[in-house]
Image (cartoon, helix red, strand yellow):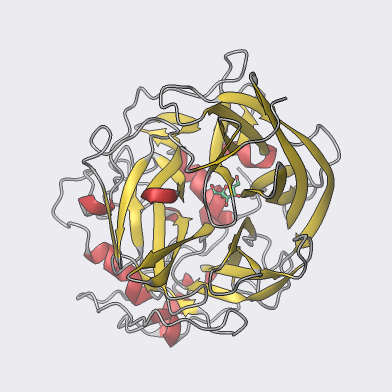
């Protein structure tokens, strides 16, 4: 498959998920030369969690020394293909006989990244007694493969009787009208319920007209939600307002790297800055591809030499978590602030970032969660597909990686084997695109369970989050697994019954 996709990481992850060694990811970066990896794992970098003003330019670093803790915590002695990860950070195994999500005619709708209807504090709402979720969807019968879905992605929505664990999600169809939306595909974002039945959708408009250099634009559109006895529907989506494109100064743009990552807006308010609305998103450090030189700061005390790390090709991995601030109450004008986290020479993707802000002993703690792939780590580093987390005292902090290396919840993976080793754990790509919900519940989608492809919502799991540690709660549900697509609400909104 030629490099036609937006991002090398998505391409790479797709190839990985398919269980095929398609060389797309590899084609987009030099073969991983063996970076000199120290024999004894150095300690993680010291992170104070201290908060800075969001307007300041401090960017916290997820260092190589931090990420090395993940491999150090993995068991070197498991038999090949077992999970080598600590059980507290491992997602329980998804059964292979999982159900799939279907439309009104019983045909499977491919579903991946999914987010609930929330307010700007992450509370999940039901509307007139219906839970509502939004998913990237693609037609499973259109002739392209699941791995080709990204270029065809469109946001669909689903509803079900609020908090009825046994109810299946009913497909409401595509969210936007057939025509009138910008670009050629719709990628992830967030959907906010505002006053009454006002809905604000933030998402990524993708234009694949030139598949070698797709254009990503963070976009806003507004609508109204309606509900009656038969379900949920939307009106509006008349105007699509482009909000942000990467500037090449703080955030890498298409000219600097055709495989840049720029997407997944998550808007939120911060109790420390009332009246303001912020957005985190997936970005890359602005630099022309190949020009970036790994710094000592990127390494931490990893025991490596920064020029050898650069020479290993690790400088192609330049993920960051971006920050933007709204300039008007309508949330149609935004400006960039410097990134809050960088993973330069560590990983190329910090996708679907989100904040969970919790009060702990009278102080707010800011948990930044983001998803990443085994295949997007820089040379010399290993970690599983899953959700990673960082904690600090504000939205711009010297973030401390959770569980010391940053891994919060990974798929069962044998880190002693290469990501695509034929003996790799059959569930190393079982789920992805995890989203952390109120109460530590985590939803995701099924990708590949022991060779069976998914494209449907995974069983929800629960993370116990305690200070700088997290662990999967295996005492709930079925050995830690709640129902497939269990996405409950913790708030209710009543509107006219239509
Ligand atoms: C994560 C992701 C998102 C993106 C979407 C595209 O699964 O790569 O970052 O918006 O998938 O399909």
Choose between 493 and 225: the one closer to the eye.
493
Between 127 and 108, the one lying in front of the other is: 127
Which residue corresponds to the image point at 30% horizontal and 74% vertical from the top-left?
A: 37
Q: Residue at x 48, y 75 (%)?
A: 394
Is the N terminus in the top left, top right, bottom left or bottom right quadrant? top right
Residue 22 visible somewhere in the drawing? no
Residue 298, placed above or below residue 125: below
- Residue occupying image coordinates x 64% and y 62%: 260
Q: Residue 215: image x %, image y %?
A: 75, 56
Left or right, 313 with respect to 391, comes to right
* Residue 2 pos. (x, y %): 64, 46
Image check: 200 left or right of 22? right
Extreme-top residue of the structure: 105
- The image quadrant of residue 408 is bottom left
**Is residue 372 visible in this depiction of the protein?**
yes
Is residue 459 toward the left or the right of residue 290 in the image? Answer: left
- In the image, residue 314 lies at what x, y percent? 46, 71
Q: Is residue 111 above or below residue 32?
A: above
Q: Residue 67, located in which quarter of the rendered image? A: bottom left
């Amino acid at each position: 498959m030629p490099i036609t996709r937006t991002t090398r990481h998505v391409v790479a992850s797709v190839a990985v998920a398919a269980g095929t060694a398609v060389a797309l990811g590899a084609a987009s970066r030099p073969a991983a030369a063996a970076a000199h990896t120290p024999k004894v794992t150095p300690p993680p970098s010291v992170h104070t969690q201290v908060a800075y003003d969001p307007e300041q330019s401090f960017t916290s670093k997820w260092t190589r020394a931090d990420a090395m803790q993940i491999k150090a915590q993995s068991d070197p002695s498991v038999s090949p293909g077992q999970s080598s990860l600590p059980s507290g950070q491992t997602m329980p195994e998804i059964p292979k006989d999982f159900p799939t999500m279907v439309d009104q005619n019983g045909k499977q709708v491919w579903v991946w990244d999914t987010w609930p209807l929330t307010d700007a504090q992450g509370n999940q709402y039901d509307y007139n007694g219906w839970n509502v979720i939004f998913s990237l969807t693609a037609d499973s019968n259109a002739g392209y493969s699941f791995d080709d879905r990204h270029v065809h992605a469109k946001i669909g929505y689903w509803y079900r009787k609020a908090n009825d664990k046994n109810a299946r999600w009913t497909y409401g169809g595509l969210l936007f009208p057939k025509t009138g939306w910008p670009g050629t595909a719709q990628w992830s974002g967030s959907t906010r319920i505002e006053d009454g039945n006002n809905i604000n959708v933030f998402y990524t408009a993708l234009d694949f007209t030139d598949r070698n250099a797709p254009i990503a634009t963070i976009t806003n559109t507004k609508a109204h939600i309606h509900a009656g006895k038969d379900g949920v529907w939307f009106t509006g989506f008349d105007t699509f307002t482009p909000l942000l494109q990467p500037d090449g100064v703080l955030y890498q743009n298409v000219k600097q790297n055709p495989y840049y990552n720029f997407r997944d807006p998550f808007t939120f308010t911060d109790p420390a800055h009332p009246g303001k609305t912020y957005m985190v998103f997936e970005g890359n450090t602005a630099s022309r591809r190949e020009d970036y030189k790994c710094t000592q700061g990127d390494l931490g005390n990893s025991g490596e030499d920064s020029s050898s790390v650069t020479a290993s090709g690790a400088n192609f991995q330049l993920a960051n978590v971006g920050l933007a601030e709204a300039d008007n109450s309508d949330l149609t004008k935004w400006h960039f602030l410097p990134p809050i986290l960088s993973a330069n020479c560590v990983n190329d993707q910090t996708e679907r970032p989100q904040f969970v802000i919790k009060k702990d002993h009278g102080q707010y703690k800011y948990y930044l969660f983001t998803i990443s792939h085994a295949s997007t780590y820089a040379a010399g580093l290993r970690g599983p597909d899953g959700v990673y987390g960082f904690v600090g005292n504000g939205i711009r902090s010297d973030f401390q990686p959770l569980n010391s290396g940053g891994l919060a919840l990974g798929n069962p993976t044998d880190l002693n084997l290469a990501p695509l080793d034929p003996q790799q754990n059959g569930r190393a790509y079982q789920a992805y695109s995890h989203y952390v919900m109120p109460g530590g519940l985590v939803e995701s989608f099924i990708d590949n369970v022991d060779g069976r492809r998914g494209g449907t919502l995974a069983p929800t799991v629960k993370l116990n989050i305690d200070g700088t540690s997290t662990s999967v709660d295996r005492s709930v549900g079925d050995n830690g697994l709640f129902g497939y697509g269990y996405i409950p609400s913790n708030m209710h909104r009543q509107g006219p019954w239509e």
